[in-house]
Image (cartoon, helix red, strand yellow):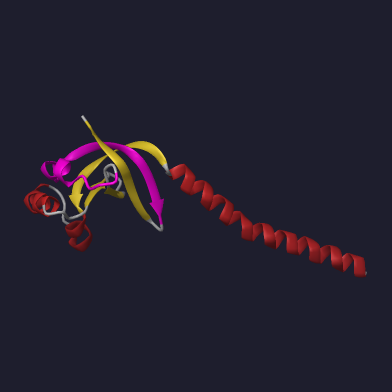
């Protein structure tokens, strides 16, 4: 009887340990998979206005251009509403993207995600 109880306790402990370790193992794989070079198409948005009040598109083009020119953070909004912060080679890409505000562009770069925030780093504008 005592050996049966020890065996059951061992099995339950092993199962519990495995269930606790599994999410840790898979989350590392997800982060690694997300850190690959990708090509993504979407609308250039200024993140301040887009996050504050959903401003985007042709009606917001002038304001977005001004915000981006003045150093506001730049984002890429995809057709399926995925939003990415855009960063060049360890520096902002505002000069390159200000004239592209409200336009659809294609960017290539390393895509990373942490705590729900997505970023395209070392982004390059594709022609």
Depth check, front residue: 55 or 34: 34
Residue visible at 20% across and 57% down in the picture: 50
Residue 104: say if magenta: yes
Q: In this view, does 12 lie to the left or right of 35?
A: right
Report the side of 97 relative to 23 (left or right). Answer: left
> As drawn, is 120 to the left or to the right of 36?
left
Q: How many marks?
A: 0
- Image coords of residue 58 (percent x, y): 10, 47
Residue 92 magenta-drawn? yes
**Is 21 drawn above or below residue 61 in the view shown?**
below
Percent x, y of residue 107: 27, 37
Residue segment shown in magenta: 90-114
Viewer can see residue 54: no
Residue at 19% in and 59% down: 48
Residue 22: quarter of image: bottom right
Image x and y of residue 36, in percent: 41, 39
């Amino acid at each position: 009887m005592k050996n049966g109880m020890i065996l059951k306790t061992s099995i339950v402990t092993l199962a519990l340990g495995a269930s606790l370790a599994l999410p840790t193992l898979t989350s590392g794989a997800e982060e690694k998979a997300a850190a690959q070079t990708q090509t993504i198409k979407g609308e250039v948005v200024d993140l301040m206005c887009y996050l504050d009040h959903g401003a985007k598109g042709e009606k917001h083009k002038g304001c977005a251009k001004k915000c981006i020119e003045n150093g506001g953070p730049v984002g890429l909004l995809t057709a399926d509403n995925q939003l990415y912060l855009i960063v060049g080679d360890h520096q902002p890409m505002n000069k390159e993207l200000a004239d592209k505000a409200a336009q659809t562009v294609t960017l290539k770069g390393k895509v990373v995600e942490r705590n729900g925030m997505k970023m395209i780093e070392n982004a390059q504008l594709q022609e």
